[in-house]
Amino acid sequence: MPLDDAAGGVAGDATGGVAGDAASGGPGRVTRSGPPAPASASGAPGEPYDVVVVGAGVVGTAIARELARHPLRTAVVEASDDVGEGTSKANTAILHTGFDAVPGSLEARLVQDGYRRLTAYAAQCGIPVERTGALLVAWDGDQLAALPGLLEKAKRNGYEEAVLLDAAEVAAREPHLGLGALGALDVPGESIICPWTTPLAYVTQAVAAGVDLHLNCRVTGVEPDAGDLHALTTTRGPLRTRHLVNAAGLHADTVDRMLGHDTFTVTPRRGQLIVFDKPARDLVRHILLPVPTALGKGVLVAPTVYGNVLLGPTAEDLDDKQATESTADGLRRLREQGARVLPGLLDEDVTTAYAGLRAATEDDDYRIHARPGQRLVTVGGIRSTGLTASMAIAAHVTDLLADCGLDLGGPPRDLPPLTVPNLGENFPRPYQRADLIAADPEYGTVVCHCERVTRGEIRDALASTVPPASIDGLRRRTRARGGRCQGFYCGAAVRELFEGRGGREGGEGHESGEGRTSGEGRGEPGRREVRGRAERR
């Protein structure tokens, strides 16, 4: 299905239109409180799961979706009250080709495979993607001299589309670029994608196919149990499983130590970013990348599928895995670097700023390994490329689980198709579609005017298979309160709809209902409004 067609589906198509899987007795459960025991036709309460995945970020949800293609009793446990609450929600939202990965590394292989898989999946279910291409811009002689090596590296990674550009070609491609650019490496396959819709699509298909999702469920201990089982202690009670996948992101090393291993340490690497308002979008045509360093890909300027422009991230190695605040020094350094790359950007209004933590380890490669004797697969060290690689990681982990003795029950089967709500600006939004509005006037009633979010979209999100537990979760599903006023004008109306669950009776999808919250909640870690004197001029 072409992306422009897929993105135009009714928002409600994603809320419950995926049929349950008969092998698991129907759709799985989404729970936020109470004991997290299986309760489907194939698993009575207290009966162990075949697989439990720890962590519901983009990688954990992708693994759950892949496992849902097999007749297994599977659960995902997540410490937060929503999916994608950690690194997954606070990244640079780039779909990487893998041109600059370390040749021969596991990351290189999985990013390249994941790029192909996720590109096709996004087109099928309407996740917005824009192929903007990227320019790695050289600003001095050393950087210019490094470009041919990067071109050769891309070729070693199997990427043949990259080409070198001289200064005149760079200026023609990006007329608002700062003075002094000496050349660039053009990587036309680099794209931007919606990082919020992606894990929601994965988990919606997984739950509809029988996977249980247990939120607010932090794992605090793992012990061997009788009969070759893992006994998990969680904040919501015990769980038992035959096989375990550790996809706990920043806390993957902690979970690994619970299982008796000390093979890697996660060092949270904070990346602060600034989001500029939509008028800035006309200033940039490509993802503008610096020549990479040992700390990462460096500070970029990139458009987003929502119509904004990102500047960032920083790269700060910290000790605190909760340190997702923005800092005055970090924002100052970003603005200094942005002034060189795209001087006009600093004349534009700032919408917000946020910070995310990447799971850096001692090794530059992914830390994915199986321990067949423990029926365990650990997925650690997944950094900024994890979004791109997620589907390939999931397939790789499933193969490793089979090597650990998991009976997959035959080849994977296709899951029922899914159409997710479109959050991208370059594809038709509900308020622009006369056919939707004629069928349901709620799609023509705008609630959030900055982002043009309608009452119908909010209603559908609140009635979805995996509904939000907070206002911030609702924003990631609809963009409501994500615009230039950051909810100043629409906040009360959005809160009223959230507390009334969108005005739809019985709109709980497959949610057990016991863990619902109301009001603003605790806010979103890693997000801070920057509307003060220093940032908004």
Image: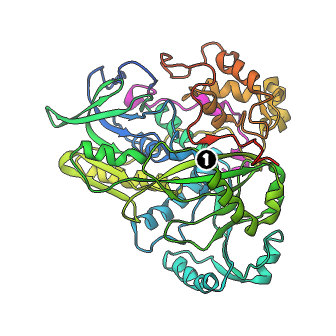
Does the magenta segment cover residue 272?
A: no
Task: Please tell me which residue is depicted at 30% across the width and 20% down the height of the picture.
Answer: 45
Q: Is residue 511 above or below residue 115?
A: above
Query: Which is the main secondary structure of the residues drawn in magenta?
Result: loop
Q: 534 above or below 15?
A: below
Residue shown at 39% from the left, 18% from the top: 34
Q: Which region is colored magenta? A: 1-28
Residue 401 is at least partly visible in this image: yes
* Residue hosting label 1: 326
Look at the image and tell me whether residue 385 can be seen.
Answer: no
- Mark 1 crowd level (few <14, some 14–19, many ≥20, 10 Å Cα): many
Figure disc tally: 1
Q: Nearer the viewer, residue 460 or 261?
A: 261
Q: Where, by quadrant of the figure, is residue 14 drawn?
A: top right
Expressed as whole percent of the image width and height from the top left, the position of residue 40 reads 37, 23
Three-letter amino acid code at disc 1? Ser
> Closest to the observer: 217 or 130?
217
Above or below, comparing residue 106 to residue 10 in the picture: below
Give percent across and percent down for residue 258: 25, 42
- The image's colouring method is rainbow
Q: Nearer the viewer, residue 175 or 77?
A: 175
Secondary structure of the residue carrying tag 1 is loop
Considering every residue shown, the one lying at the far left of the view is 226
Residue 507 at x, y percent in the picture: 61, 18
Between residues 98 and 282, which one lies in front from this camera angle?
A: 282
- In the displayed image of the protein, which residue is found farthest to the top? 505
Picture quarter containing residue 457? top right
Picture quarter containing residue 38? Answer: top left
Relative side of 179 to 66, left or right: right
Figure check: 235 above or below 259: above
Residue 25 is one of the magenta-drawn residues: yes
Q: Is residue 411 left or right of residue 515?
A: left
